[in-house]
Image (tube, rainbow, N blue to C red):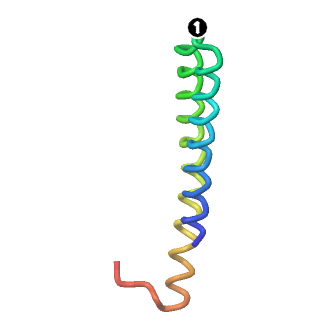
Amino acid sequence: MRLLIETTSIVAGLIAAWVIASFSAWAYPRGAADIWLVAYVCMATTVLLGIGSVRRALRRDRETLRRNGTAADD
């Protein structure tokens, strides 16, 4: 469950960055190339910063499944 929450959080951040960049590029077409460059950097940063949280969530979910005895053999 934690993994789903963390992944959803990253996806929501990517969607938000894309929407903001789209509206910004539409509002200021002369700066569209720079706007998209910054948006792509923000999206990459969002993914990179989320990797640690995803790894921790995956580890905790696996521990919970093993503790409860519901995990399939890996």
Q: Quadrant of the C terminus?
A: bottom left
Q: Toward which corner of the image does residue 54 lie, by quadrant?
A: bottom right
Q: Farthest residue in the top direction?
A: 30
Residue drawn at the location 64% of the way across and 32% of the way down: 20
- Residue closer to the observer: 39 or 19: 19
Q: Toward which corner of the image does residue 24 lie, by quadrant?
A: top right
Count of numbered labels shown in the rendering: 1
Q: Position of residue 33 (x, y in %)?
A: 52, 14
Residue at the disc numbered 1: 30
Residue drawn at the location 54% of the way across and 57% of the way down: 7
Residue drawn at the location 62% of the way across and 45% of the way down: 13
Determine crowd level at label 1: few under 14, some 14-19, many 20+ residues with C-alpha closer than 10 A: few
Residue drawn at the location 54% of the way across and 22% of the way down: 36
Q: Farthest residue in the bottom direction?
A: 69
Q: Is residue 55 left or right of residue 24?
A: left
Q: Position of residue 68 (x, y in %)?
A: 54, 90
7 versus 17 height, above or below: below
65 versus 18 height, above or below: below
- Residue closer to the observer: 19 or 62: 19
Q: Position of residue 21 (x, y in %)?
A: 60, 28
Q: Farthest residue in the left direction?
A: 74
Q: Toward which corner of the image does residue 1 lie, by quadrant?
A: bottom right
What kind of element bears circle 1? helix
**Amino acid type, mark 1:** Arg
Q: Position of residue 61 (x, y in %)?
A: 55, 74
